[in-house]
Amino acid sequence: MGLRLLDSRARSRAELVEAMAKKAVPEAVIAEVLDRFEDVGLVDDAQFAALWVEGQQRRMKSGRVLRQELRRKGVSDDVITEALEETADDADYTAALAFAQKRARSMTGLTPEVRYRRLAGALARRGFAPGLCHRVVHEVTAEGEEFYDPDRG
């Protein structure tokens, strides 16, 4: 059963424990199987976290959202911190900028106020910090047109 789960994608140890427990596999058997999987390199939470961060950054998510997702998957905070530290310092900025540029292409007919509000909201829902949202939206919308600043009205 555990091998079938690992066939589709890498999984954390906690995900495998949960899936096997749902199938009424005894705890002693779960521990023995997963220990063996770790020995042969099939289960490695550090590698899982690093792969998850790398894959999800391509989907333009913030570090905060990635941390929450990994916690839900049962990865320890130390492993999560290590995986996120391996990313580039400007990873959040790069992901936010790429996402905003992609979104902005479909908003060319909107007023600056509406475009700002929609882009900032979309970035915030992806977990980016307010200051970063403002900076990125300013950069994306200021290219060739007047920028709407909500602080100035």
Image (cartoon, rainbow, N blue to C red):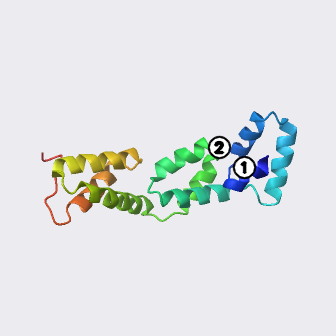
Residue that carries the numbered disc 1 in the rendered image = 5
Q: Residues within 10 Å of mark 1 (few under 14, many from 20)?
A: some
Q: Secondary structure at mark 2?
A: loop
Q: In the rendered view, does 153 fall on the left or right side of 5?
A: left
Q: Secondary structure at mark 1?
A: helix
Q: Position of residue 45 (x, y in %)?
A: 68, 53
Q: Establish if 141 lies above or below 113.
A: below
Front-most of residues 114 and 39: 114
* Residue at image point 19% right, 62% down: 142
Q: In the rendered view, does 106 fall on the left or right side of 26?
A: left
Q: How many marks?
A: 2
Type of the residue with mark 1: Leu
Residue that carries the numbered disc 2 in the rendered image = 74
Quick one: quadrant of the C terminus? Answer: top left
Residue 43: assigned label: none
* Residue at image point 27% right, 47% down: 118
Q: Residues within 10 Å of mark 2 (few under 14, many from 20)?
A: some
Q: Earlier in the sequence, mark 2 or mark 1?
A: 1
Q: Establish if 109 lies above or below 73.
A: below
Hey, which quadrant is residue 20 in on the image? top right
Q: Position of residue 107 (x, y in %)?
A: 24, 54
- Give me the C-alpha separation between circle 2 and circle 1: 16 Å
Residue 112 shows in the view? yes
Q: Position of residue 144 (x, y in %)?
A: 16, 66
Type of the residue with mark 2: Gly
Residue 10 shows in the view? no
Hey, which quadrant is residue 90 in on the image? bottom left
Q: Nearer the viewer, mark 2 or mark 1?
A: 1
Q: Position of residue 94 (x, y in %)?
A: 39, 63
* Residue at image point 44% right, 62% down: 91
Front-most of residues 21 and 87: 21
* Residue at image point 74% right, 34% down: 22
